[in-house]
Amino acid sequence: MKNAMQIIGVVALLFWGCGSGSDNGELSEVNLDSLLQAKKANEAAKLPDEVVADIIKSIPSPLEMTALIKASGAEYSQNILNNTGNTENYTTNFNRSLNLGVYSADLGYINIYEKTSRSVSYLNVVKQLADELKVGQFFDFSTIKRLAENNRNIDSILYISTSGFEQMDKYLKEKNRGNLSMLILLGGWTESLYIAGQVARVSKNPAEKLVEKIGEQKIVLDDLILLTGMYRNEPGFPELIEDLNNLKKAYSDVTITYTYGEPEMKEVDGVLVVVDNSSSKVNITENQLDSVIAAISALRNKIIS
Amino acid sequence: MKKNILFLLMLYLSGIKAGAQCEDEKFLDNCAALLDKFVFVKSFNIDQGKSKTGGEIEYSYVLSKGTSYLITICDQAEKGNRLILELYDRNKKLIVSSYNKKDKKYYPKIAYPCAATGVYYLKYRFEGSKESCGVSILGFDKK
């Protein structure tokens, strides 16, 4: 069956308005000091909208991770994915957004493996959560479902879904609901890293490319911590940030080394093709990989529970 | 005087029209069609009117080692005001430009098989000073 459907946790967010504390002129030095420190921390956490949007835009699509998992030769595993029956547990916009990202990444995984009979049930929960978040209008679910059921062109399905996410992102930004965008993005990234981790864990000799890909996520994690920090005063975020910091600790000794090489260019059938002579190498030990997998599993399992 | 007002009005409306064209779904669809077998990842809108850095618009994206990317560049095809993309690496070293100065050639597609994971910068600018817009799309090879 040559078909699939995928929805990526793309997205963006807006800004975070910082509140101020009371000022009664009778604060002790200690209180004043702590207030000033808190204010400093808040200011550091504020980023201009354009910067935030740029960071969000720079986060890689979970689709890339999923495609690599399949390319590594790993077998499809339904047990790894979040159960569609869990949706009734997601009663707040915080949980709905995170799990919209999770299910979207799952859908990508299912369809990259061309398990189309499964994709429709995941598409339904994505629709349900998107509707509950009032962003379902950006996805042409009927067309996507029809294409999936008829085993039509996977690229068309991916395009419709992904561009739908971009429109949703834009809308959420305009409506000052950037925190939800952020959570959808985080949910998708977490799920794709979790799936990669599980594939690596069960494999006696995981593909080097897959291990490197897991190690590379250290680059993305720093940005995600920066973004979630902007919402740390909102419900649910402090615990999320703590879990992300635990993941950061697991990544602390993972290093990436680079070697520069002058690029070369050639034209092939009217396309300018770059021959990249630079290279990078992720240095990650087995123990470090285990720690990363444990930390991402803890985070992911909290998200879906 | 009337002629001047009319001219300014036309100039203003042509600006709106150009911006609207680039935000049109069809414009995006046509640009996405250039991806061929590459999977759509992100689109980048380039509206010179919204640039805060003297006409240049910059985006960044984490490109991954071992993945082949294709970047499409779509503009209004106005002579003297073509859209140019320059791709820079994590150290802001130029990798490639969609405009070949030597041959005076504009490339609508750049293929980049990435060999080093990291943050890359996509800088867009129009060669002329006229306000214009365009779209650029990043895709990857899922194989």
Image (cartoon, grey):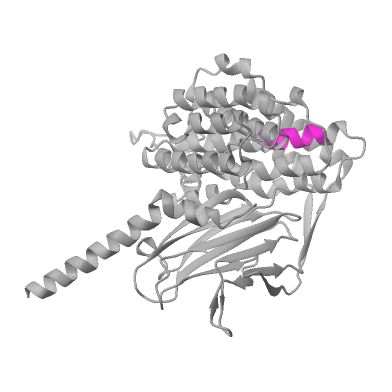
**Spot occupied by residue A110 in the image (x, y as percentages of width and height):** 69, 31
Q: Nearer the viewer, residue A280 or A263?
A: A263
**Spot occupied by residue A252 in the image (x, y as percentages of width and height):** 75, 45
**Spot occupied by residue A185 in the image (x, y as percentages of width and height):** 57, 38
Q: Quadrant of the C terminus of chain A?
A: top right
For residue A122, above or below residue B79 = above
Spot the residue most to the right: A204
**Spot occupied by residue A275 in the image (x, y as percentages of width and height):** 73, 69
Magenta residues, start to end: A191-199
* Quarter of image, res B75: bottom left
Q: Nearer the viewer, residue A305 or A77?
A: A77
Q: Count the labels in the image.
A: 0
Give me the residue at 39% from left, 72% from top.
Answer: B78
Q: Is residue A298 magenta?
A: no
**Is residue A228 among what the camera can see?**
yes
Give me the residue at 34% from left, 59% from top.
Answer: B19
